[in-house]
């Protein structure tokens, strides 16, 4: 049996782009996804792009019996763990669902891995673990801070759980990747972000306004202490983020907990994003300045030096490519993956 990489949540936005890059690099990939926030069509598109299909198991990371079967059936050498829920507002309304999926799901996965003797794991963490009071830019040496919502707390809890696990069994090699704001789509126009209902995140919202599915963008806050009064974030191309996972796999040979920020290190404001998108879509984007959104920080971005120094990874795709790829995906798939 050849070695395979297990990708939980591999039908989702970031997991699908990472699966493409893993297949392109010659890995055998097993995707485990319950499709609660994704579509099986994404798996067809992965095959279309990479010329190879991942093995697909429709199932839940909380299902211990299923996980044992997966580890018996395939020779899994490492796990990339994307599966989880990610809507910040929803996590405030439904904290138990978020802790169950994100924390308990990770716990069951680690138990199954330990049982199978697989001790190499890359976890999808988030810049949100730095908390509300961290100084910017965020750097990995800063401690985790006070998280603003159950989603963020669930990520911080999993980071702690994994750290404790590695102390108890030092053979584990664990990579915690703290993503900043992934946007963009595959340059083929075949894969992209397909949020259910009205998008919470900026780029899907902008793209749906531009295509006429939504009327107007509300810019949350115009009086922040930033260059133009709107919030600033560190947006990175989802393919650069996917490649960051491949680069970080080299650390899976070194026992320990390895933490990396994956971002560009460059802040971009909401207003600048609107202006840049107007140029790419070649049309004006209706927007208004609205009240601030509860829980938003004025600005944060990454110090991404550690990933460059230790992994040789750097986000290379410029903002324009992020927006052109988003627009190609949106115009070719106006209803996302639904046919
Ligand atoms: P996504 O919702 O597109 O992908 C998550 C995938 O996991 C989906 O396909 C979903 O069906 C699956 N899933 C959810 N719960 C599951 C479960 N219990 N069992 C099996 N499958 C399950 O989200 P994404 O944007 O691709 O995010 C991937 C990961 O990265 C998540 O853990 C998310 O919290 C984290 N992350 C995302 C961002 C972002 O801005 N998108 C930023 C930081 C961290
Ligand atoms: C970006 C900027 C908004 C929508 C969230 C999570 C974070 C991570 C990424 C998972 C902000 C503004 C947005 C709109 C707007 N996810 N905005 N109008 O809030 O930086 O991060 O997603 O880990 O944990 O918190 O991303 O895309 O929601 O917002 O003005 O309709 O766009 O105020 O400044 P955010 P976002």
Image (cartoon, helix red, strand yellow):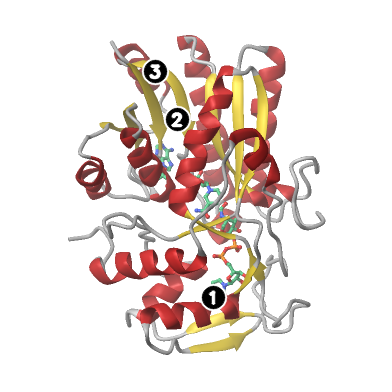
- Determine whether 278 is above or below 28 in the image: below
Alpha-carbon span between mark 2 and mark 1? 38 Å
10 Å crowding of disc 1: few (<14), some (14-19), many (20+): some
Residue 294 x/y as whole percent: 67, 70
What label does residue 62 carry, if any? 2
Residue 279 x/y as whole percent: 43, 82
In the rendered structure, the answer to whether residue 289 lies left or right of residue 329 reads right
Disc 1 vs disc 3: which is toward the camera?
1
10 Å crowding of disc 2: few (<14), some (14-19), many (20+): some
Disc 3 vs disc 2: which is toward the camera?
3
Residue 59 seen in this snapshot: no
Alpha-carbon span between mark 3 and mark 2? 18 Å
Alpha-carbon span between mark 1 and mark 3? 41 Å
10 Å crowding of disc 3: few (<14), some (14-19), many (20+): many
Badge 2 element: loop
Asked if the beta carbon under badge 3 is closer than 8 A to the nearest atom of ligand 1, the reply is: no
Q: Residue at x 24, y 67 (%)?
A: 332
Badge 3 element: strand
- Determine whether 272 is above or below 2 in the image: below
Quadrant location of the N terminus?
A: top left
Quadrant location of the C terminus?
A: bottom left
Q: Quadrant of residue 23?
A: top left
What label does residue 76 carry, if any? 3
For the residue pair 166 and 35, the one nearer the viewer reads as: 166
Q: Residue at x 71, y 56 (%)?
A: 148
Asked if the beta carbon under badge 2 is closer than 8 A to the nearest atom of ligand 1, the reply is: yes
The residue singled out by tag 1 in the image is: 273
For the residue pair 333 and 67, the one nearer the viewer reads as: 333
User: Mark 2 or mark 1: which comes first in sequence?
Assistant: 2
What label does residue 176 carry, if any? none
């Amino acid at each position: 049996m050849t070695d395979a990489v297990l990708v939980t949540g591999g039908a989702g936005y970031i997991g699908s782009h990472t699966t493409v890059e893993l297949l392109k690099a010659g890995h055998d990939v097993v995707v485990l996804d319950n499709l609660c926030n994704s579509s099986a069509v994404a798996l067809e598109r992965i095959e279309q792009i990479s010329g190879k299909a991942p093995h697909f198991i429709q199932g839940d990371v909380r299902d211990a019996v299923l996980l044992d079967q997966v580890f018996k059936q395939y020779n899994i050498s490492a796990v990339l763990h994307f599966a989880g829920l990610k809507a910040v507002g929803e996590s405030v309304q439904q904290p138990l669902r978020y802790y169950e999926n994100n924390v308990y799901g990770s716990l069951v996965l680690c138990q199954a891995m330990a049982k199978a003797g697989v001790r190499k794991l890359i976890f999808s963490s988030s810049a949100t673990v730095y908390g509300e009071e961290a100084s910017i830019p965020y750097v990995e040496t800063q401690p985790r801070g006070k998280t603003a919502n159950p989603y963020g707390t669930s990520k911080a809890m999993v980071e702690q759980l994994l750290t404790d696990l590695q102390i108890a069994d030092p053979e584990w090699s664990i990579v915690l990747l703290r993503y900043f704001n992934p946007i963009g789509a595959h340059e083929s126009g075949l894969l992209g972000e397909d949020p259910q209902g009205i998008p919470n995140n900026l780029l899907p919202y902008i793209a749906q306004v531009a295509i006429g599915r939504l009327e107007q963008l509300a810019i949350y806050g115009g009086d922040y202490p930033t260059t133009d009064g709107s919030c600033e974030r560190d947006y990175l191309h989802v393919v650069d983020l996917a490649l960051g996972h491949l680069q970080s796999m080299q650390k899976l040979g070194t026992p320990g907990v390895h933490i990396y920020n994956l971002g560009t290190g460059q802040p971009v404001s909401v207003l600048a994003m609107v202006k840049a998108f107007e140029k790419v879509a070649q049309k004006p984007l209706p927007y208004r300045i609205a009240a601030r959104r509860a829980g938003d920080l004025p600005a944060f971005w990454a110090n991404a030096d550690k990933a460059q120094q230790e992994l040789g990874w750097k986000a290379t795709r410029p903002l324009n490519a992020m927006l052109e790829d988003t627009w190609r995906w949106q115009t070719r798939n106006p209803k996302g993956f639904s046919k």
